[in-house]
Image (tube, helix red, strand yellow):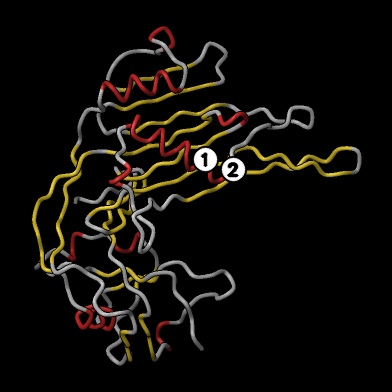
Amino acid sequence: MKIAISFLALQLMAGPGFAENLRFTQYGTPIPAHTSFDVRWNAPGNPFPPQTWIYQLLPGELSPRVASNLMVLCSFTDKDRLGKGTLLNFKSSDGQRRLWISEVDGTVHYEVALHYSPTNLSLGIPSAEEAVRLAKNLLPKLGVNLADLDKKENSSEPDFRIGDSQTMFYVNHAFITNLDWRGVGFRRGIDGASFLSGDTGGNGDIRFGSGAQIIRIDLSWIKLERVKVYPTVNPDTIMKSLRDGKAVQGMLRMDIGDIDWRNVKTVTINKASMCYYAGNILIESEH
């Protein structure tokens, strides 16, 4: 039986003692050591650069220009601010809009309360193409350079992820579908690799509601600093790591079920790509 696995996480940097600092188990299920694995490399050549940098996440103040842009975009003034300190907290007079800006770790959260009903449906939700255009115009105002975004495979275009949400109303024995919003997700790209993080410095999401108005912004975007460079491992070393139990199984399709790795005989690697991991908001990576 052949099973398609969404990803296997392995260390790609050849450095003594480095593996112990990576929390790969956050990705999924650790694969037990299995020296009899028949591991085959079927990916095109060696997709990795010869060297890979370690980056340090740097705390730093959010640009005053970005904070000012957010206040304008979200229609707030200094009169709407609650309290003082490094957390800028704004609330509209009717309580329907909130904006939080952390000047310390570069996080932003803006949200508008939605009150759709059968007699108050959305109108003018942007198409996927229009949402991407709007996001491209907004991101520089939020301090995000489009050149720093993760790219589509074999393309220079940002890899935006489009999503939406719908609500169903049942009225007079018929269903009414309301499109609540359409959103654009994005993440950082470094040295041609995806930056994987859970609100720790390199991801975000912007949602648009009726009339293409911004109804939500989630952004975590801080500075990075190169710390040390390591040689990147080759395919042979990657296959050995898999046999030695230094890999983690990611998510599977729901129709596949669990894998009993004790009974797996052959593993074929059809595609390989490099990613940077920065932990999540609960357990941050040290680098």
> Where residue 58 sits in the image (x, y, percent)?
18, 39
> Where residue 143 sits in the image (x, y, percent)?
30, 33
Q: Residue at x 15, y 55 (%)?
A: 54
Question: On the rendered structure, is 214 left or right of 228?
Answer: right
- Residue 62 occupies quadrant: top left
Residue under numbered circle 2: 127
Name the residue furthest top. 79
- SS state under label 1: helix
Residue under numbered circle 1: 131
Q: Tell me the kind of residue under disc 1.
A: Ala
- In this orientation, which residue lies closer to the viewer: 135 or 209? 135
Estimate how packed mark 2 is, as few (under 14), some (14 to 19) or many (20 or more) residues with alpha carbons within 10 Å.
Answer: some
- SS state under label 2: loop
> Where residue 113 sits in the image (x, y, percent)?
58, 27
Q: Is residue 195 above or below residue 45?
A: above
Whether the residues at callouts 2 and 1 have beta carbons within 8 Å, the answer is yes
Q: Residue at x 31, y 79 (%)?
A: 44
> Where residue 226 sits in the image (x, y, percent)?
12, 49
Number of numbered labels in the structure image: 2
Q: Residue at x 45, y 33 (%)?
A: 217
- Residue 223 occupies quadrant: top left
Q: Is residue 39 above or below residue 111?
A: below
